[in-house]
Amino acid sequence: MADLVSGEASESDEELQDKNKIFAAEVSGEASEEDDEDIYEQRRSSNQVNSTASIYRNNLLQRKLIENNIAIWRSLTAFTRSFVLSASKQLVTTDQMLIKSQLSLQSAHTSLQQAQKNAQDLQTRVSAVITSNFLPHINIHKAI
């Protein structure tokens, strides 16, 4: 087959048709490919049949590639799902721990506010005791 040069017309129609063909060897001892159906093949009305789909029909290599692609997709999906599930569980656990910490801090804050109020009351009472006169003022008159 002659190479096509862009800008030139092809020498025959067969050259264009040969480019769309896929060649695959049949392994002896295996079932023939003619009776098998491609997993992507769908029943369509005769006016919707795509010529590209017929190229890949019953091609062993194409079927193996599709099966491997599906296996990779399933593995990747399972990995992603397990990764997301474990990450979401860790996030839920962390969120619960943060809520417990927040409650503890709120309780400690309330206790500290109460202690501060009690300390101010005690300071007020102590200053009142210290500034008050323990002994009453005694007037001494000189007797003449």
Image (cartoon, rainbow, N blue to C red):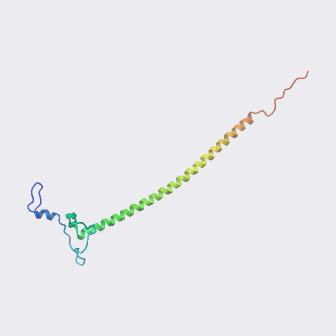
The location of residue 97, given as percent across then percent down, is: 53, 55
The location of residue 59, given as percent across then percent down, is: 23, 70
Q: Would you identify the image quadrant in which residue 120 lies? A: top right
Q: Would you identify the image quadrant in which residue 57 lies? A: bottom left
* Residue 91 appears anywhere in the view: yes
The C terminus, quarter of image: top right
Q: Residue furthest bottom?
A: 29
Q: In the picture provided, is 133 more to the left or to the right than 90?
A: right
Q: In the picture provided, is 64 more to the left or to the right than 138?
A: left
Q: Residue at x 54, y 52 (%)?
A: 99
Q: Residue at x 45, y 58 (%)?
A: 88
The N terminus, quarter of image: bottom left
In the rendered view, tell whether residue 5 sits above or below residue 119. Answer: below
The location of residue 87, given as percent across then percent down, is: 44, 58
In the rendered view, tell whether residue 131 sits above or below residue 119. Answer: above
| Count of picture labels | 0
Q: Residue furthest top?
A: 144
Q: Residue at x 65, y 44 (%)?
A: 115
Which residue occupies the foreground of this view, 48 or 137?
Answer: 48
* Residue 1 appears anywhere in the view: no
